[in-house]
Image: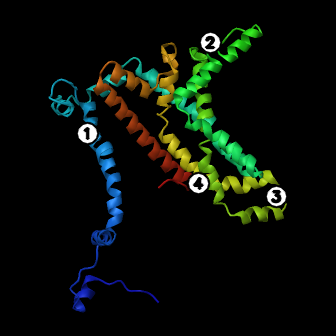
Amino acid sequence: MSKTAVTPTDHAARGDNRKPRTSRSGFWHYAVKNPDLYLMSIPGLLFLVIYKFIPLYGLTLAFKDFNLFIGDNIIDSVVKSPWVGWKHFARIFHEPAFLQVIVNTLLISLYKLVFLFPVPILIALMLNELRIGWMKRWVQTIVYMPHFLSWVIVFGLFFSLLGSYGIVNQVLGAFGIESVSFFSDAGWFRSLLVFTDGWKDSGWNTILFLAAMTSIDPQQYEAAIVDGAGRFKRIWHITVPGIVPVIMLVFVLRLGQVLNAGFEQVLVMYNPAVYGVADIIQTYVYRIGLGKLDFSLSTALGLFESVVSFVLIMSSNGLSRRYLGRSIW
């Protein structure tokens, strides 16, 4: 039995003067009935406003010649600094080091994407196939643990292994092989960044894929076993297709962060000897902003990075939706 939509004319014909409830009135009606939920959300909303939205005014520094001493306080200095339009963005593209910084950022990020993106998927597939409960728990704990170490600790561990007087170079010297300066050799440093990042976070990134595997219907595996499918066929035809939406979600988000090559990692591990291959946008902004106190140029660089990241994540999501039929929104 079909339902007929009630129009304002129908209300008037029945002598009903009440207006149809709009979404806005529905929201307030729900808020009045559930005030505790909205009271609980107040701290989170205040956090967003104070630490996320109000600081956005600082982006105006990208279009101003910021003078820290022109006002009575930092906010007054931002307001009183003169507008200069696109001057600092023009400076960015005329900076001799900027092109090298962009190349370094893209290369390090793409290396991590190509070599490290499949690793959590492979680890998750192997963990999913482990049938010995205690072994699976131990392996998960071991591969998750590095994630909880800070990059300072990770640097200390690998420096004790790969530093000039580390264990690896001592072993090489014992066999008469010339030592390798992993941390100050431009030819090795990017590989070192990729390896240490994979060691630290690949295990932790398996959590999403393991969670996706739990949503696969076990009856599919049972039917495949009855049909004579082996373990590798079950993985290829059931497990992998079952986690493809999560893979695409992570891949689209990772593409949107292609200009984020790992600020904390690079800042802790690099040195002037490898600036030519390791200086990325974030470390360059850090050195320009704090080292030279050029806040306007560093803000322009950060805004440029954010806009490019936004364009990348929008375009990659659109391509995924068009050609693969899956997207984030």
* Picture coordinates of residue 181, whole percent (x, y): 61, 13
Q: Nearer the viewer, mark 3 or mark 2?
A: 2
Amino acid carrying mark 1 in the image: Tyr
Whether residues under marks 4 and 3 lie with C-beta atoms below 8 angstroms apart, the answer is no
Q: Few, some or many C-alpha atoms within 10 Å of disc 1 (few <14, some 14-19, many ≥20)?
A: few
Residue 303: quadrant of the picture = top left
* Picture coordinates of residue 211, whole percent (x, y): 61, 54
Q: Is residue 6 left or right of residue 266?
A: left
Q: Is residue 305 left or right of residue 251?
A: left
As measured in the structure, the alpha-carbon distance from the residue carrying label 3 to the one carrying label 1 is 60 Å
**First in sequence: mark 2 vs mark 4:** 2
Q: Is residue 276 above or below residue 85?
A: above
**First in sequence: mark 2 vs mark 1:** 1
Amino acid carrying mark 4 in the image: Pro
**First in sequence: mark 3 vs mark 2:** 2
Q: Helix, strand or loop at disc 4?
A: helix
The residue closer to the viewer here, 112 or 200, is 200
**First in sequence: mark 3 vs mark 1:** 1
- Looking at the rendered structure, which numbered label has been put on residue 57? 1
Q: Is residue 67 left or right of residue 272?
A: left
* Picture coordinates of residue 306, whole percent (x, y): 39, 37
Q: Residue at x 68, y 64 (%)?
A: 217
Q: Few, some or many C-alpha atoms within 10 Å of disc 4 (few <14, some 14-19, many ≥20)?
A: some
Q: Helix, strand or loop at disc 2?
A: loop
Amino acid carrying mark 3 in the image: Ala
Amino acid carrying mark 2 in the image: Ser
